[in-house]
């Protein structure tokens, strides 16, 4: 849910600015509205200081990660000195890296020609003998003759010959590519590379020694960020009466009103706490139960709804959890996720515990989905009538509700029907929430368009079920033995037809009401096709990816199992567990299922988000104009 906010309007005497803002930062609950007229030039220096300290802390953290053990922390040096040393080391390291890069290129140029002293070339030149370097195609070099010059091959590079040419006086023209070599010997360059590497190692040791001051730099960074936030708050105060009076507009959660009133009583200031006006840009904070809170990052990655709109997190969280489980759909893979999450819960820092809890829930969802899909490392768990292949348990397929079943009419995939059902339910939920949101904000007229979507969907499917459209058997649509199509048949045929055909004029009358004339007609026709005629059924069919990914993961796991067992299976079909090829079986199983698990994780990360963002959140038609609630608070 979106947290209810209160508006704080305040006028303050200018001499109380410093203590008031400092105390407000300690309070940590008031979001100050940015002053559009503020001069932010004074913030560049402290912002640069924060950036510098942040980069220094990142360098120390990276260096500490390479150490065998974390060093004991010290506080005998000021942070400024530590930052100066880190800056010096960084400059030195960049200089070394640049020179190493130059030397590496020089070495690559000289290596094919061997190690020689460039001074010899100068001595030959002083004696009137010209020496040049050429690269000539091997097939051409054997027949190449240059009057007045001696050619000697010194090496090869691919299909080219590396040739030195000597002549007394000026070098005659040679039909080949002349190579300009650096005026350094290969030995000297390699010696310099060794010196630079040793210097770089020394610089790294210096940085590693400074990791003992990581906490000092961290505290300094926190102080700089707090100071920057405080200075920003100073600039967000508007000046009045020649700067004698200062004013601000802020926002606070309604639950903190009493706390803020008690705080304001300690200052000589005029203040008013009121409800937001419809025209106010109110910052948005979301607060949900422990389960939905784990999925709030998904919403924040997309955008925040406006303050007066609904928070969709509690509505898409259960679907997302289910989608991830169905995309992986294997008990063994879910167990691995569950075990990893439990390990992270007990070993990882406190900041990672919410992420560990999220993975724990997704792992549990994957285990349940794996039971329903009847898969364990690509092996069928429960066997029974219609279940082909080897099974861990010869019976019990009735518990695996989504397992594919072979029948006289072909293979039945209950998961495919379930994907369509869950897609239809989530999409209809989106339209219902859209109606509620539109009524809350603008009354009944804006709600007529999403209502037309609901009428079109239910009326169209019910009518198709009554007339058995294209023999699709919508009236007999069932999932796991439950006939959901019968629910559509419960709507009288006449009522279903009225619902279906009334959806079109309802959509046309209330679509694009802010447009006029031909623009409205064109946009309404386009929206009618995109959002209703093709959009709804296209969106529902998008949920088939859940069936496809779950099925693919199981099939690929089974393929790796078959490939692995081929090494230890005889021509008669018997398995030889003591075969010398058993290590190859283990290797294929480990490598194959590692790859399959990785692919399942990628699919479970991408496609549930895609369904949430494109099919659900976009059909909510929220403004997504919310700005996050960021109170002035000490870190």
Image (cartoon, rainbow, N blue to C red):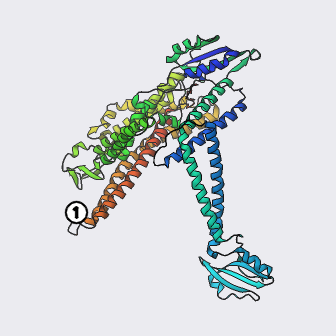
What is the residue that sits farthest to the front in this orientation?
76
Residue 43 shown left or right of residue 467 in the figure: right
Which structural element holds mark 1? Answer: loop
Asked if residue 190 is positioned above or below residue 496 in the image, the reply reads: below
Circle 1 residue? 577
Residue drawn at point x = 58 percent, y = 53 percent: 202
Residue drawn at point x = 34 percent, y = 50 percent: 551
Q: Residue 548: horizontal and vertical position, in percent?
A: 38, 49
Residue 40 shown left or right of residue 404 in the figure: right
Q: Residue 140: horizontal and vertical position, in percent?
A: 65, 84
Residue drawn at point x = 36 percent, y = 44 percent: 340
Query: Is residue 219 visible in the rendered structure shown here?
Result: yes
Res. 247 image quadrant = top right
Instruction: Please state, as top left, top right, bottom left or bottom right, where the C terminus lies in the image.
Output: top right
Q: Residue 480: horizontal and vertical position, in percent?
A: 27, 41
Query: Is residue 278 visible in the rendered structure shown here?
Result: no
Asked if residue 529 is positioned above or below residue 556 in the image, the reply reads: above
Within-10-Å neighbours for mark 1: few <14, some 14–19, many 20+: few
Q: Nearer the viewer, residue 256 or 551?
A: 256
Res. 460 image quadrant = top left
Residue 28 shown left or right of residue 554 in the figure: right
Residue drawn at point x = 38 percent, y = 51 percent: 597
- Give the tally of numbered discs: 1
Q: Nearer the viewer, residue 186 or 376?
A: 186
Q: Residue 37: horizontal and vertical position, in percent?
A: 72, 26
């Amino acid at each position: 849910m979106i947290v209810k906010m209160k508006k704080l309007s305040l006028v303050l005497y200018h001499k109380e600015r410093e203590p008031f803002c400092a105390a407000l930062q300690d309070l940590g609950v008031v979001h100050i509205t940015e002053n559009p007229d503020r001069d932010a030039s004074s913030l560049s220096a402290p912002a640069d200081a924060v950036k510098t300290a942040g980069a220094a802390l990142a360098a120390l953290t990276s260096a500490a990660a390479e150490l065998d053990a974390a060093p004991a922390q010290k506080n005998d040096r000021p942070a400024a000195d530590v930052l100066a040393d880190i800056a010096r080391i960084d400059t030195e390291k960049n200089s070394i890296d640049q020179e190493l890069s130059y030397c590496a290129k020089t070495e690559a140029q000289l290596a094919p020609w061997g190690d020689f002293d460039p001074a010899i070339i100068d001595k030959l030149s002083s004696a009137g003998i010209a020496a040049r370097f050429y690269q000539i195609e091997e097939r051409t070099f054997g027949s190449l003759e240059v009057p007045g010059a001696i050619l000697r091959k010194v090496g090869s590079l691919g299909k080219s010959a590396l040739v030195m040419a000597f002549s007394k006086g000026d070098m005659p023209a040679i039909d080949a590519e002349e190579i300009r070599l650096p005026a350094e010997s290969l030995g000297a360059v390699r010696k310099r590379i060794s010196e630079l590497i040793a210097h770089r190692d020394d610089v790294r040791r210096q940085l590693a020694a400074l990791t003992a001051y990581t906490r000092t730099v961290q505290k300094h960074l926190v102080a700089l960020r707090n100071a920057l936030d405080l200075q920003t708050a100073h600039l967000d105060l508007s000046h009045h009466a020649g700067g004698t009076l200062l004013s601000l507009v802020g926002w606070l959660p309604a639950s903190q009103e009493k706390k803020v009133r008690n705080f304001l009583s300690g200052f000589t200031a005029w203040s008013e706490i009121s409800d937001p006006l419809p025209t106010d840009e109110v910052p948005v904070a979301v607060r949900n139960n422990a389960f939905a809170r784990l999925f709030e990052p998904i919403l924040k990655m997309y955008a925040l709804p406006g303050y007066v709109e609904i928070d969709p997190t509690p509505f898409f969280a259960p679907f997302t959890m289910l989608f991830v489980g169905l995309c992986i759909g294997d008990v063994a893979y879910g167990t691995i996720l569950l075990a990893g999450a439990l390990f992270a819960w007990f070993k990882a820092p406190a900041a990672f515990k919410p992420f560990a809890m999220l993975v724990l829930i997704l792992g549990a969802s994957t285990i349940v989905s794996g039971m329903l899909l009847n898969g364990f490392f690509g092996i069928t768990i429960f066997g029974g009538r219609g279940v082909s292949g080897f099974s861990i348990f010869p019976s019990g397929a009735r518990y695996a509700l989504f397992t594919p079943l072979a029948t006289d009419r072909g293979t039945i995939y209950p998961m495919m029907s379930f994907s369509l059902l869950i897609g239809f339910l989530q999409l209809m939920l989106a339209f219902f929430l859209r109606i509620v949101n539109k009524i809350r904000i603008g009354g009944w007229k804006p709600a007529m368009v999403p209502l037309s979507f609901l009428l079109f969907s239910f009326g169209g499917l019910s009518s198709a079920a009554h007339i058995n459209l294209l023999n699709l058997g919508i009236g007999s649509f069932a999932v796991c033995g439950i006939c959901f199509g019968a629910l559509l048949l419960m709507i009288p045929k006449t009522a279903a037809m009225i619902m279906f055909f009334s959806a079109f004029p309802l959509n046309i009358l209330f679509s694009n009401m802010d447009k006029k004339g031909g623009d409205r007609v064109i946009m309404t026709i386009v929206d009618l096709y995109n959002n209703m005629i093709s959009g709804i059924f296209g969106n529902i069919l998008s949920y088939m990816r859940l069936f496809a990914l779950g099925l693919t993961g199981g099939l690929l796991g089974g393929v790796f199992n078959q490939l692995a067992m081929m090494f230890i299976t005889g021509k008669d079909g018997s398995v030889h567990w003591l075969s010398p090829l058993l290590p190859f079986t283990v290797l294929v199983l480990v490598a194959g299922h590692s790859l399959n698990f990785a692919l399942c994780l990628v699919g479970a990360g991408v496609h549930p988000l895609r369904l949430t963002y494109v099919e659900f959140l976009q059909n909510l038609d929220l403004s997504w104009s919310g700005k996050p609630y960021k109170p002035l608070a000490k870190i």
